[in-house]
Amino acid sequence: MLAEHHTFCDLDALIDQVHHLFTQWERDERFAPSLGVDDLHRLKLAVHEWLANLVQHAHFNGHDPVISLSVEVQDDGIQCTISDNSDGFNLDDELTLRSTSLESLPERGMGLLMLQACTKRLSYTRVQGSVQKLEFVVSTQDNPWLKIQFS
Amino acid sequence: MSLELKTHNEETVIVRIGKALDFRNASDFKAQCQEQVQEGARNFILDFSDTGILDSTGLGSIFSLYRQVSPLNGQVVFASVSRPVQVVVQLTRTYKVFRQFPSVEAAQDTLA
């Protein structure tokens, strides 16, 4: 299976480093033809939203941050795993809270909902010790959308 | 990550978004646009030609601008929308709120 694995340790540089990876993948058509250009951009958006959440809100409890990104092409899309050594949180509870409290034309609170909207089989679990793992699939067959009130 | 604002006329401002509008520069976008509104701008043309990421915080800052200029009969429109931004527009159905133009010039002609 076509796959990529990368590890990052600098939160300040994380977003730029990951964007650079995606730029390379798009330029080199790394996952073509399994993954279309728009599928790759949807994957980038999902990864970005999660990493932005980590950068802004995660507590690493004195540990040096270690974040790993793995992507692997599958039959129906691309499987993505992002592990981190933060304290973690209950993603399902947070998604429920956000979806029930989203304002019209919201300024904040859309990030995790956008991540949820453009993925399937989304989960965030503690795997061992202080390592948390986010897993999801970006489908190549769906046309996902997030319902936002505009008035 | 620098934003470039250019005054087209006393009511219309062109904002060249650059590589990203995300959680790192959204507050800067909001502050600079707010300053323009205070100086009389009502219409904003957002040029996304080079933009590789528009994230939820960036989109939220555009919603904030829209809420600010709508009561003034102003508009926020998207121009030269890149593929990554188009993915966000489709995902959030924001084409219902923000008109899109193939180029900044086309947007200028319509808003003139």
Image (cartoon, coloured by chain):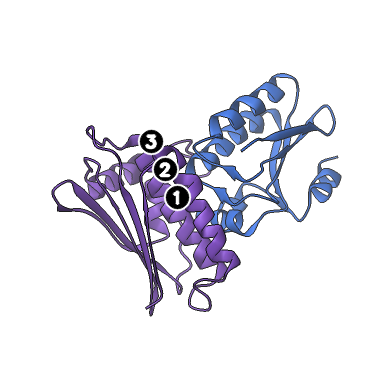
Q: Is residue A36 above or below residue B97?
A: below
| Label located before the other in sequence (1 or 3) | 1
Proximity of marks 1 and 3: CB atoms separated by less than 8 Å: no
Q: Position of residue A62 (x, y in %)?
A: 23, 32
- Image spot of residue A127 (x, y percent): 17, 55
Q: Which mark is residue A56?
A: 3
The foreground one among A34 and B109 is: A34
Report the residue marked by disc 2. Answer: A52
- In the picture as drawn, the residue positioned furthest to the top comes out as B38
Q: Are marks 1 and 3 on the same chain?
A: yes
Task: Say which residue label 1 marks.
Answer: A48
Q: Chain of mark 2?
A: A
- The C terminus of chain B lies in which quarter of the figure? top right
Image colour assigned to chain B = blue
In the image, what residue type sits under mark 1? His
Element type at mark 3? helix
Which residue is depicted at the point 38% across and 39% down?
A55
Other-residue count near label 3 (Cα within 10 Å), few / some / many at <14 / 14–19 / ≥20: few
Chain letter, purple in picture: A
Drawn side of residue A61 relative to residue B3, left or right: left
Q: Which one is nearer the viewer's eye here, A81 or A123? A: A81
Picture quadrant of residue B81: bottom right
In this view, the residue in front, A42 or B67, is: A42
Q: Chain of mark 1?
A: A
Q: Is residue A110 left or right of residue B30?
A: left
Q: Kindly identify the residue that appears in the image at 39 percent across and 41 percent down.
A: A10
Q: Nearer the viewer, residue B102 or B43?
A: B102
Residues marked 3 and 2 touching at CB (< 8 Å): yes
Secondary structure at badge 2 equals helix
Label 1: how many residues lie within 10 Å, few (<14), some (14-19) or many (20+)?
many
Left or right placement of residue A72 versus residue A90 in this view? right
Q: Are marks 1 and 2 in contact (CB under 8 Å)?
A: yes
